Image: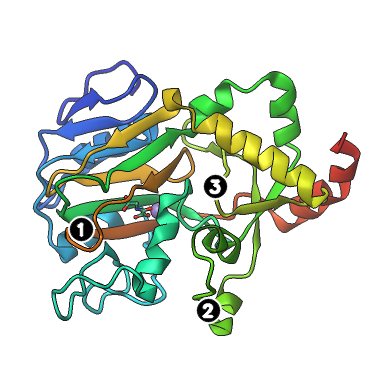
Amino acid sequence: MTGQPYRHITVRPLHPLFAAEVTGIDLTQPLPDDVFAEVAAAFDEHSVLVFPGQRLDNDRQIAFSRRFGELEVMLKGVVGEDRHLAGISNVDPKTNQIIPADHPRMLRQYGNELWHTDSSFKPVSAKASLLHGREVPPSGGETHFAAMRAAWDDLPAEKKRLCERLVAEHSFVYSRRQVVKEDFLTPEEKAEVPPVPQALVVENPRNARKALYVASHAERILGWPEAQGRALLDELLAHATQPKYVYTHRWRPWDLVMWDNRATMHKGSAYDYRNHRRVMVRTTVAGDAPTITADEVRRREAEAATLAA
Ligand code: OGA
Ligand code: MN
């Protein structure tokens, strides 16, 4: 599809490296297969798609998201009762009032302000996320995206060879500790999210494009001393989030933004949590498989010590 005009949709790049706006499409209506195929191709090509002015309700958001694959089930749905929806919001849907900024439901969300990819702390991480802006604050609350394919492409060859032989361990408990000092997860909640291994480099099988796969959830490099693994992860995160790799999305009401978790990182930004309403609804398309097999994790972990120069 690269270089060819789309016949049914209009695709306008938003950044030199990735991200595009898609117009000429109404997502409140079921999409014919040929139109959907163009959206899917644009998604593989650009990694972040912005669909402005889509007045979706929960059911329509779920229906469109489902076209890309099975949806992840949230631990506890906060939007209505449907567990395929995650509320990224400072408004209590039951009372329609702003939630106090120190409430556990808010504390849980501040972790979104660290660079991450969704669900990399789960054995099968998320393929795509779709976030819909229902109410957006007048300032702040932007979402930043980092182009992890470009970040990968630009790494020196030697670093690429190293990364392709390593495994990172991702942990939800670890990333949440970075933002909130007090422990707001119960022992039961922690037990549901044990650390998981993830490849440091992932490839999209549909176009063979590779991307660096790190996130605030990445805690250590398997088989490496703590400090050395931390140094590599911090270096990769700093590299990938240089301004030249970042697209910042400023939300307008009814934007639907869809991103490829295996080709981008993202992070939210602060806003006036106490005075401005921000109501976003996310659907999440599950990945097809883990980023690495258990056998390969064992093989790389055993070999890692020899690479720790
Ligand atoms: C998310 C997320 C950031 C934001 O929905 O997965 O990280 O800006 N959101 O709300
Ligand atoms: Mn996220």
Callout in the foreground (1, 2): 1
Does residue 53 appear left or right of residue 86 in this picture? Answer: left
Q: Earlier in the sequence, mark 2 or mark 3?
A: 2
153 over 77 or under it: above or below: above
Q: Amino acid at mark 3?
A: Ala
Q: Amino acid at mark 1?
A: Arg
Mark carried by residue 189: 2
Q: Amino acid at mark 2?
A: Glu
Percent position (x, y) of residue 280? 23, 58
Q: Residue furthest right?
A: 306
* 10 Å crowding of disc 2: few (<14), some (14-19), many (20+): few
Asked whether the viewer can see residue 208, the reply is no
Q: CA distance from mark 2 to mark 3?
A: 21 Å
Helix, strand or loop at mark 3:
loop
Q: Residue at x 74, y 28 (%)?
A: 161
Task: Decide if ligand 2 comes within 8 Å of the CB at mark 2.
Answer: no
Residue identified by numbered label 3: 215
Residue identified by numbered label 1: 278
Asked whether the viewer can see residue 140, the reply is yes
Percent position (x, y) of residue 186? 53, 82
* 10 Å crowding of disc 3: few (<14), some (14-19), many (20+): many
Task: Determine whether label 2 and label 3 are within 8 Å by CB.
Answer: no
Of residue 1 and residue 78, the one placed in the foreground of this image is 78
Does residue 186 appear left or right of residue 38 in this picture? Answer: right
Q: Quadrant of the N terminus?
A: top left
Task: Determine whether label 3 and label 1 are within 8 Å by CB.
Answer: no
* 10 Å crowding of disc 1: few (<14), some (14-19), many (20+): many
Q: Residue at x 37, y 27 (%)?
A: 18
Helix, strand or loop at mark 1:
loop
